[in-house]
Image (cartoon, rainbow, N blue to C red):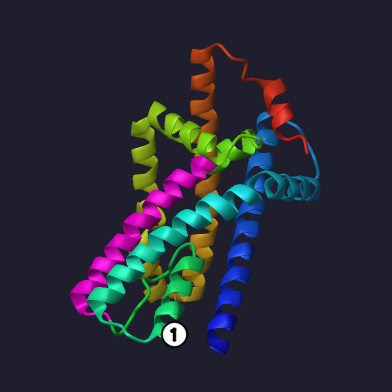
Amino acid sequence: MLVLIETSGFWIITSLGIAVSQSCVHGVIFVLLVNHLLKKRKPIVTLLKDGAILGFRRLFTFVASVRSTTRLISTTILIIIGCHFGRIKDIHKIFKIFVKVTCLPFFIWLPHVEEFEQAIYYMFSVSWWLLEILLSLVFTIFGCVAMVNPYIADMAVVERGFHLLSLNIRSVIGLKFLEEIVFGSLTRYILSQIFGHLFASFVQSFMEVYFLMVWTTYYFCVKSMDAHRRREPFGRNVFRNLIKI
């Protein structure tokens, strides 16, 4: 019981830490990109500070609620299926697996569970890979929507996110395909086998930040298209208001 309590505390602290870090990083990328579009020159320290504060204020609630809840439900379903067919009876071991796959946003290598039969492990791995693709695609755009519209409900963010994704679906598929080639599961595995897990982690982190900027740029493009269709303003004045703390 004590071990489960300690593990639960670790899961809560880790989840909050991930939500804070994701919110701040997204905010920094957002502010850097908007500042570049406005062609303003500010000290990098000021931009980092403003971006972290803006991201935490506008995204923390969204990331901690919607994204964590979605991941929690999806991971629970995968764990239940995997443990049922994999015949794992140790509750403590099941909880450890649950904490691992829930807390880590991406994997350098797929989680190995010795008790899973080979066929079940492959099913679990493929299901997890597809889940990661879906979540990384959807919530990158949704995060931008929440940054621009911090006071609307989460369901409204989801609705606007799907609408913006549908405006240029070919670019979405192309960008996601390129993202998977550059630092997908196969690429991460090859890098980790040749250069080690530390180097693969560094490359993965760098590419995640790079593609976060790419997806933010995509958001501005489709948002501009949508605003033009609706005959709404979307220019320098709008950008200035976006980064007001």
Which span is picked out in magenta? 116-142
x%, y% of residue 4?
53, 83
x%, y% of residue 54?
72, 44
Amino acid of disc 1: His
Q: Residue at x 72, y 35 (%)?
A: 243
Q: Is residue 207 visible?
A: no
x%, y% of residue 132?
39, 56
Q: Residue at x 56, y 43 (%)?
A: 143
Is 150 displayed left or right of 128 in the figure?
right
Q: Residue at x 77, y 45 (%)?
A: 50
Indicate the quadrant where residue 35 lies: top right
Indicate the quadrant where residue 169 lies: top left
Q: Is residue 123 magenta?
A: yes
For this orientation, the residue located farthest to the top is: 231
Instruction: Establish if 226 lies above or below 78.
Output: above
Is 10 displayed left or right of 128 in the figure?
right
Instruction: Establish if 20 lies above or below 87.
Output: above
